[in-house]
Image: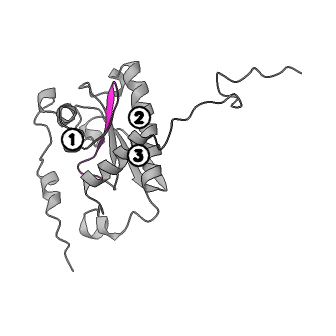
Amino acid sequence: MDRLWTPHRMVYIGGQDKPVDDRSSSCPFCRIPALSDEDGLIVARGTWCFVVLNLYPYNPGHLMVCPYRHVSDYTELTSEETDELARLSQQAMRVTRAVSGPDGFNLGMNQGAVAGAGIAAHLHQHVVPRWSGDANFLPIVAHTKAVPELLGDTRARLAAAWEAGAVHEARPTNDDPASPAAPAPKES
């Protein structure tokens, strides 16, 4: 059997960048906002949350939306944090569609280490682009994932599209019956 050499995965397996405890002082998601966008791989910053590339992506363009506040449980978010986390997740999908054209997405939060959270002390929403056929033989045979672009290049392309306003938030129209701005239905 042939072997694929992927020494970069040992960093993740060895625990680099994982916090040593649950305190904010050892949390990478608390340290990232103090870095430049380039160094922190930050794609966009909001008032309550920020969007960052995953350093160990499941797929190319794998983003995370994180609150600035060090909070572990979704039920502990304020209404402002919850709203912005949702809006930034939606915008992350729009921007990724415009830049990379994925066929779908996986969205989710792993709440607690037992649920799969690598950094359980700081909540983060995953936005993982998916393409038809992206589940190829590499993860099965070689236990690795091919990421065809440097993370810094991916961040730059996504951030440029985000800042350029290449995509816009969906706005309800007066023709949308679910919209609060829609006129009341006429009575017969």
Residue span colored magenta: 44-57
What residue is pinned by disc 3? Answer: 161
Task: Choose the circle earlier in sequence order: 2 or 1.
Answer: 1
The verdict on residue 56 being magenta is: yes
CA separation in Å, label 3 and label 2: 14 Å
Percent from the top left, x then y, of residue 23? 14, 27
Could you say whether the residue bearing mark 3 is in a helix, strand or loop? helix
Question: Is 135 on the left or on the right of 1, as rendered?
Answer: right
> Secondary structure beneath disc 1?
helix
> Depth-wise, is mark 1 or mark 3 nearer the camera?
3
Label 2 element class: helix
Of 92 and 21, which appears nearest the observer? 92
The residue under label 2 is 88
Q: Which of the image's four quarters has the C terminus?
A: top right
Q: For this rendering, which residue is in front, 94 or 10?
A: 94
Quadrant of the image occupied by residue 122? top left
Left or right of 127 on screen, residue 141:
left
Q: Is residue 146 magenta?
A: no
- Look at the image and tell me in which quarter the N terminus lies: bottom left
Where is mark 1, residue-wise? 40
> For mark 3, does the 10 Å Cα neighbourhood hold few (<14), some (14 to 19), or many (20 or more) residues?
some
**Residue type at tag 3:** Ala
Judge the density around disc 1: few (<14), some (14-19), many (≥20) Cα neighbours within 10 Å: some
Residue 125 seen from this side: yes
Q: Is 52 in front, or is 120?
A: 52
